[in-house]
Each structure stands twice: as structure tokens, then as C-alpha cells.
Image (tube, rainbow, N blue to C red):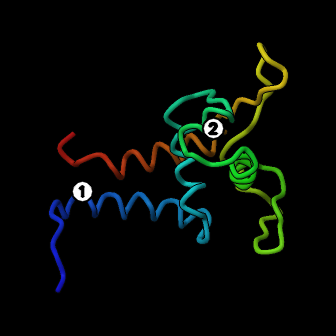
Amino acid sequence: MATNVGNGPALGRLVSALEEFRQIAPKMEVNQMVIFLLIAQKRGIKMTELGSLTGLSRSSVSRNVLALSKEAYTDSRRSNPDGLDLVTTLTDPFDSRSKIVALTAKGTEIARRVVAKLTPPDQ
């Protein structure tokens, strides 16, 4: 028996926003979407903060950020030789051991489109 969870318009907007990601990379993982959205929410977020916010290990955060970046990403299960070019990493000017992640111009445009899809029509 199906249960209606309510607020169909909000769920419809969420599905529409997720479609933006599928247009870029049909096999994009949920963790990559979450990391992208956290980067979009906080400009110049540190990799360590992404790990704290998501509960992912340092290596998982690095792998997901790399998948979203311009650099090639390959492993035994997935391949994206051109990269998505949605984020870039920079060395923290105050701590050379830390990396800061920011959206690229392409990433900023995708973030704007996602936010537009999530915004109710009356706003």
C-alpha cells in the first residue's frame, strides 16, 4: 500500500533539481551531489570540513572532489577522463597543508540552475 508523504510540489522541484545533475553526468553519485551542494553553499570550504559535514573519510572526500574537478578521474569501476570541471582545489594561503574547494564558472552556473529548480514559483 503506497503512502502519500505530502508536498508533491516540493518533491517535484527536488526531482527537477536532481535532473540537472543527471544531465551533466548520468551516473553521478549522491555523495558527489552532496559535496557539490556543500561547496556551492560555502565558498572556499576546506576538504576537512567537507569530511566533517558528510561523515566521509578523507580519501572519499578527495575521490569525490576529484570526480567533480577538471582533472581526469579513473578507477576500476568508473571513468571520466575529461573531468566534470565543476570544482577546483586551491592551497589554503594560511595553511599550505590544507586544500580549499570552490566552484568553477561551470559549477557556479549549475548551482544557479539547481537553486532555480528548488525555488518555489512564487518567490
Q: On residue 88, which mark appears?
A: none
Q: Residue at x 66, y 47 (%)?
A: 86
Dot label at residue 103? 2
In the rendered view, tell whether residue 110 sits above or below residue 81.
above
Question: Horizontal placement of 111 versus 50: left or right?
Answer: left
Image location of residue 42, percent across then percent down: 53, 30
Q: Amino acid at mark 1?
A: Ala
Residue picked out by circle 1: 10
Q: CA distance from mark 2 to mark 1?
A: 26 Å
Name the side, left or right, on which 46 lies relative to 37: right
Outermost residue toward the bottom? 1
Q: In the figure, is residue 102 to the left or right of 22?
A: right
Amino acid type at image mark 2: Leu
Determine the image quadrant of residue 105. top right
Residue 3 in percent (x, y) is at 16, 76
Q: At 34% from the left edge and 58% from the top edge, which residue is drawn?
A: 14
- Which x, y percent locates residue 41? 49, 34
Picture residue at 55% right of the left edge, 45% below the top: 54
Q: Secondary structure at mark 1?
A: helix
